[in-house]
Image: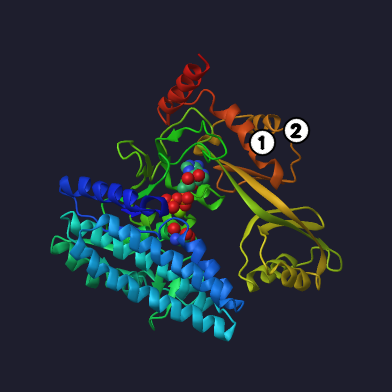
Amino acid sequence: MKFGGTSVEDAPAMKRTAEIVRGRRDKGLEAVVVVSAMAKVTDLLLAAAAAAGRGDKAGALAIGARLRHRHIDTAAALLETERFAKLQLALHAEFDALDDLLRGISAVGELTPRTNDLVVSFGERLSSRVMAEALQERGMQGAHVDARRCIVTDANYGKAAPVESAIEGKLAEVVLPLIEAGKTPVMGGFIGATVEGVTTTLGRGGSDYTAALVGGGMHAGAIEIWTDVNGIMTTDPRICPDALRVKTISFEEAAELAYFGAKVLHPATILPAVQKSIPVWVLNSRNAANEGTKITAMADKCASPFKSIAAKKRLTIVDVVASRMLMSHGYLKAVFDVFDKYKCAIDMVSTSEVSISLTVDSNQQLPEICSDLSKIADVKMEGNKALVCLVGEDIRGHNGIAGQVFSAISHVNVRMISQGASEINMSFMIDEEDVEEAVRSLHKHFFTNPDETVFDVTGRDNANRIEQESKA
Ligand code: ADP
Ligand code: ASP
Ligand code: MG
């Protein structure tokens, strides 16, 4: 059971989370709990590390002090006096260590990726300690596990890759005995360590990944991702408040959605689960009675072509025009090698006789990439782009879908189009500022009369009723 930042953001949220865990235990199920840092804590830790790196010691320590108060106040509201007193000592010791670290970084005035990971790791280390005690207090034998003992990774700081073969053994050694003793292990997501024991992180949103690694490594019966929405929705409800819950979605569809920007799941989450055919559920910790979304090996038949619409901003289009080599043998490889050298992932590619257009995250290395590419071609970059992606296994069975997509957004300027090789996504690039409008138009077109076996329309009925009542 993985609980995201909003599910542990304060004492009431942690209480709700504890009750959800109790619900599973009452059914006779054994659970491993994986928690994110409390909401916004990772952002604040990153800001503290950056401030320290600039030599702004006071700024960094001020953030540390804020976080110290927030964690201690939360613990105080959750625990009885004696248990709180004990935890408080432990939390102070952790925050003292964080302060020392920030002072050290400020003194040197330099922040390495390795030290940055150590700073952000405090978020999950602390939230998991508090959560473990909250479960103890409620009679559920919460047992804190430092995730760094189990999640073995390489040393690619900031986006470390897990070493799954090693993780399985560690889980058997560290976590399994706790379960066998009737305890509820609680560990932080997102963090890990190299074989040498150096702290690493799995990349933003990485707690979902931890949950899947633990679920996969322990052959769990199910992986539950508890968040702040009713499941995977037909699009981000922040863009379209009338988005509908998708009742079931296939692994493949969910993976495409996550990869193309649906923040509800980390892109790498699905893989360890697919390999072991473990069902994944996305559930709402604020509305635990809701059924959520079940991610299954095969998609149910659906009368609507798409399951959901995702959007990913902050992308750059790189146009590479062959000048000297005119698409000669080995040319594509040379172009892709440059991106490979900078470990830069490419989202979309389209080619013409003499040019290749690629889309990448707008990252700091683009100038270097550009300069390397210009040795073999003419290069042009266009930033502030966004990718909109419609996903659904049933695109295959429908004719004229592309026509419908592009007439729904005929007022928007479309730059690149691709129908994914997997045949379950259709995506295109537009200007960042057009994203909300485009997604709303597409949502209206494709989800006004949805297939009720796959989409939960009761939410929409309620929304309509409330709107009508408020008008009346
Ligand atoms: P957590 O902290 O629980 O991991 P996240 O903020 O990472 O939560 O992910 C949940 C958020 O993902 C939702 O609040 C929602 O705004 C966003 N989101 C984007 N696309 C979708 C989608 N298709 N379905 C549901 N939520 C989505
Ligand atoms: N706390 C980390 C983040 O904010 C990991 C996560 O929440 O999944 O990115
Ligand atoms: Mg998340």
Residue most extreme to the bottom: 108
Task: Residue 288 in the image: state x and y as whole percent.
Answer: 31, 40
What secondary structure is found at the residue carrying circle 1?
A: helix
Give the Cα distance between marks 1 and 2.
10 Å
In the displayed structure, 26 sits above or below 468; it is: below
State the residue in front, 144 or 278: 144
Identify the residue at horizontal 58%, vertical 32% (top origin).
443
Q: Nearer the viewer, residue 106 or 163?
A: 106
Image spot of residue 208 (x, y percent): 41, 56
- Residue 33, given in percent of the width and then of the height, sits at 29, 57
Q: Quadrant of residue 441?
A: top right
Reading the image, the residue beneath label 1 is 437
Residue behind mark 2: 411
Give the residue type that dot 1 points to.
Answer: Glu
Residue 285 appears left or right of 40 = left
Earlier-in-chain disc, 1 versus 2 = 2
Residue 275 picture quarter: bottom left
Q: Could you tell me which residue is drawn at 23 percent across and 73 percent down?
A: 173
* Disc 1 versus disc 2: nearer the observer: 1
Badge 2 element: loop
Placement of 150 over or under 1, stated as above or below: below
Can residue 406 be seen by looking at this rendering?
Answer: yes
Q: What residue is at 74 percent from the left and 37 percent from the top?
A: 412
**Residue 265 on image: x %, y %:** 46, 51
